[in-house]
Image (cartoon, helix red, strand yellow):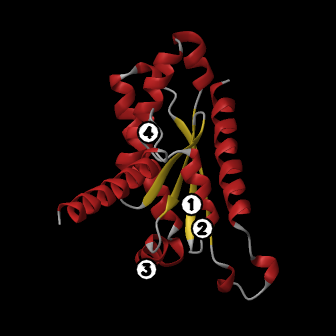
Amino acid sequence: DSNADWLCITFIYFLFLQYFSNSFFKIDTMTTLLNQKAFLARKAQIDFNTAFIAIDVNNFKNINDTYGHSVGDECLGKIGEAIYTVFSKDGFCYRSGGDEFTIVLKPGVLERMKAQKGNRFKECIQELMRALDTEIEFQAKLDSHLKDGVSQGFEVYLLMENFSRREDYISVDEALKHADDEMYEAKKRRLEVQS
């Protein structure tokens, strides 16, 4: 009887370790957001209407070069906190590389936004992006290293079944690239205004 108890305890412990290690390896330790490995896994599984939001920290190299990597790491942590505060209810939040972050809206969120705003559902996404700017402005009051904020871009991905013509369809990778391109355009416009 006690052998069966020990066997059950060992099995439960094994399941706990497996769950913990799987979860642990999907977390970015600097920001506590999901990491690039988790992002790539999510990207491969997307089979729902969604939006991708690309975010990049402005002048991050300058922060690292001027104040050191420990200050840069702190800044990334604060940006991650701001992203989580604004987007975690509606999206999966990833640190997808260096100073880059990606939000993938959760299943059903885009449909909810469409129901609220009709064809103006992109306004809902833009509202979230403005909320992030406000959150980062608040963080910048506490830490002046964040004064340059972030650049953002987004693209909506719709399942191919929503298109009558093949040429209207874009893939997940194309949607991600469009979001990234829009984010870099925003960064470029910002630099032009500064100079």
The image's mark for residue 53 is none
Q: CA distance from mark 2 to mark 1?
A: 5 Å
**Element type at mark 1:** helix
Mark 2 lies on residue: 45
Q: Quadrant of residue 83?
A: top left
Mark 3 or 2: in front is 2
Q: Earlier in the sequence, mark 3 or mark 1?
A: 1
Q: Earlier in the sequence, mark 3 or mark 2?
A: 2
Q: Quadrant of residue 91?
A: bottom left
Question: What residue is shown at x 76% (from left), y 77% (from top)?
Answer: 168
In depth, the one of 10 and 185 nearer the eye is 10
Mark 3 or 4: in front is 4
In depth, the one of 190 and 12 nearer the eye is 12
Q: CA distance from mark 3 to mark 4?
A: 29 Å
Q: Residues within 10 Å of mark 2 (few under 14, many from 20)?
A: few
Mark 1 or 4: in front is 1
Mark 1 lies on residue: 42
Instruction: Report the side of 181 relative to 13 (left or right).
Output: right
Q: Earlier in the sequence, mark 2 or mark 4?
A: 2
